[in-house]
Amino acid sequence: MTEAAGITAWRSHAIQRLVEARRAGDPVTEQQTVAELLDMHVALGERRTGTSEEQRTYLLARSTRTPLPELAAVGIDTNEWPQPPHSSPALAEPLPASPDTEERITSIFNAAGPLTDWRPHVPRYEARYRPQDGQRFQGKPLPWAIWDTREGIAVSYHGDQELAEYQAEQASERVEARWRPA
């Protein structure tokens, strides 16, 4: 069986033989055909036959315990078959890195320095100039927003930059104080 041909046509023919054997009451041919289907699907699961697409489809069906529809239609539940012994190709042993490669990788890590969990402090609220929001109070524009940096939304607007910055700083400090361990 070639990679290009796959097993789809062969399986259709085998299923037809199985149906005819059942109709004729021929248990020997029926058992022989089921055994051939089993052998072919074991080979498919071991990637020894069929197209890549057929192999992937079969292995995915087996891993999700989904019977193959064309076989289920004739009463064969592929979940009752044994799992393919080698359902994925063996992993190759890793090759040791050359001393030059090891030296380059080590120098990159040394240049980066030690790992830390340090993240720059970002306050919860900040003042942002957002005239595009079009906020007004008593006809006066409110171009300064107090912006919630976690939620990504404006929570209030002010006409004065200094007041907006002061209130954003105060709100951030209050929120942080609430979550600090006592």
Image (cartoon, rainbow, N blue to C red):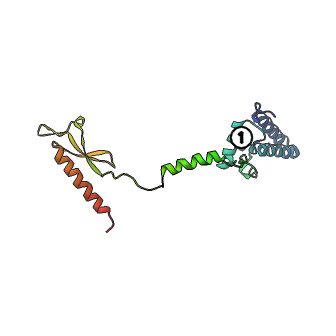
Residue 40 point in image, percent of width and height: 80, 42
Instruction: Tell me: 23 left or right of 72.
Output: right
- Residue 26 found in image quarter: top right
Residue furthest to the bottom in view is: 182
Secondary structure beneath disc 1? helix
For the point 33% across and 48% down, which residue is it?
Answer: 151
Can residue 23 be spotted in the picture?
Answer: yes
Q: Which residue is mark 1?
A: 55
For the N terminus, the quadrant is top right
As rendered, which of 152 and 105 lies closer to the eye? 105
For the C terminus, the quadrant is bottom left
Q: Residues within 10 Å of mark 1 (few under 14, many from 20)?
A: many
Instruction: Tell me: 80 left or right of 120.
Output: right
Q: Amino acid at mark 1?
A: Gln
122 to 179, vertically: above or below: above
Residue 126 point in image, percent of width and height: 26, 48
